[in-house]
Amino acid sequence: MKLPASLQARVQALRVVSRPPHARGIASSSVSQRAVISSLNSFSGVTASESDDERVVRMLMFGKPGAGKGTLSARLTKKYDILSISTGDLLRQHINEGTEVGKQAEAIIARGELVPDDVMLKVVTSKLDCLQDKHWILDGFPRTLNQGKLLDAHLRKQNTPLTLVVNLNVADEVILNRVSDRWIHMSSGRVYNTSYNPPRIAGIDDLTGEPLTKRPDDNPEIFSRRLEAYYGLTSPLLSYYTSQATAPVSAPVASPCQHPHQVLLHRADKLALRSVTGRTSDEIWPELDYIIMSMFPGLRNRGDDVFSPKSQGFDNVVSAGTLSATVPPPSLK
Ligand code: AP5
Ligand code: MG
């Protein structure tokens, strides 16, 4: 699918956007530094339990490339006891570490195309299966209708269906501006923006002191292909989730000895789809936060409610190497 002419012009204009002076000559961050390994060390250990009359956050953060999925997921995981999994971050870690998945994904990502569904399903489920009783957000998956169906089938088997899809509705023009200003800390996935949330020291990650880099797929040509892939392959998922969210709920079959309360709990798992629209964080964040608070009233707040764009919470991001089967319980705070 071709981008509209107005957007092609915008992409063209971005080609002449000059890099911030501090950015020139910044080297890639060290592959060996996997800052996200800290993710489970700061995890509070609170276990989501559907028998506690609480809905469990099993959420998709859905939106175009550059819509703010990573940024807003980080805000939520900073405020609430939720973990997030970003498939883009996982793939970049696989690439950095030279795994088989990384070797397969590198050229595909560089072209702005999508990694095959079967590879992505393995990447995601290997992480998701460790989070069965936790609150989680998926950022960047599913991205095709087939991925959506595969994910549903996988979650259904575990009786842990999705509870919320949030669609970040941000105009293409806004996104194109943002991405030209984006810098990342490769090993953790931390996102900065020279105009929105700049690092404390230009070109340097706030937490590790390591250099920031541009994502190789953030140049205008590749970014326009990523947008095309979104419109062609990913946006149809919105209709898929809309029909799930609006389908009548079939009444669960109650056993004679089941308390009526339990029947209600079962119904509470119906998928909700919410769209949030805005150009800036001031517009989007309060609305998103309200959705989470109102839909999941029992969700534990981490206690640090004060958000500063400069100190986004990235400690609760699930990394490629974080969750092996043998990970010991994190030291609880
Ligand atoms: P991925 O890394 O997931 O990229 P993406 O979906 O294209 O999304 P981005 O990470 O670019 O954007 P974002 O929405 O997270 O926005 P961000 O918070 O950074 O995937 C990369 C590649 O991997 C894909 O192209 C594909 O090849 C492959 N891949 C991944 N998943 C796959 C899958 N399931 N199947 C197949 N292939 C897959 O924000 C963007 C910028 O805006 C930042 O600079 C940020 O600081 C700024 N910003 C964010 N929010 C705001 C705000 N509210 N106000 C102002 N500025 C803001
Ligand atoms: Mg992202």
Image (tube, helix red, strand yellow):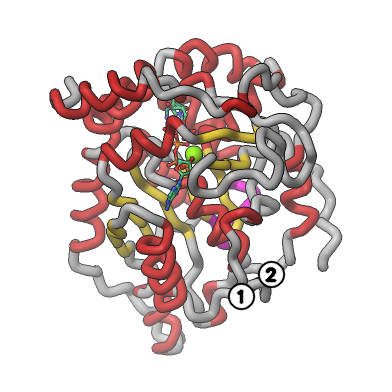
CB-based contact (under 8 Å), mark 1 and mark 2: yes
Q: Residue at x 40, y 85 (%)?
A: 256
Q: Depth check: give the residue in front, 267 or 313.
A: 313
78 falls in the magenta region: no
Q: Secondary structure at mark 1?
A: loop
Q: Residue at x 48, y 80 (%)?
A: 297
Report x, y in % for residue 165. Answer: 36, 56
Label 1 – label 2 distance at C-alpha: 8 Å
Circle number at residue 46: 2
Q: Which residues are magenta?
A: 127-136
Q: Is residue 6 left or right of residue 61?
A: left
Figure check: 142 above or below 251: above
In the rendered image, which quarter contains the C terminus? bottom right
Can I make out residue 137 in this image? yes
Q: Depth check: give the residue in front, 21 or 141.
A: 21
In the rendered image, which quarter contains the N terminus? top left
Pointer 1: what residue? 300
Q: Is residue 250 left or right of residue 135?
A: left
133 falls in the magenta region: yes
Q: Depth check: give the residue in front, 222 or 309.
A: 309
Report x, y in % for residue 278. Answer: 30, 56
Report x, y in % for residue 50. Answer: 52, 73
Figure check: 97 above or below 48: above
Q: Number of marks in the image? A: 2
**Tag 2 or tag 1, which sits nearer the N-term?**
2
Disc 1 crowd rating (10 Å Cα; few below 14, some 14-19, many 20+) is some
Label 1 vs label 2, nearer the camera: 1
Circle number at residue 97: none
Disc 2 crowd rating (10 Å Cα; few below 14, some 14-19, many 20+) is some
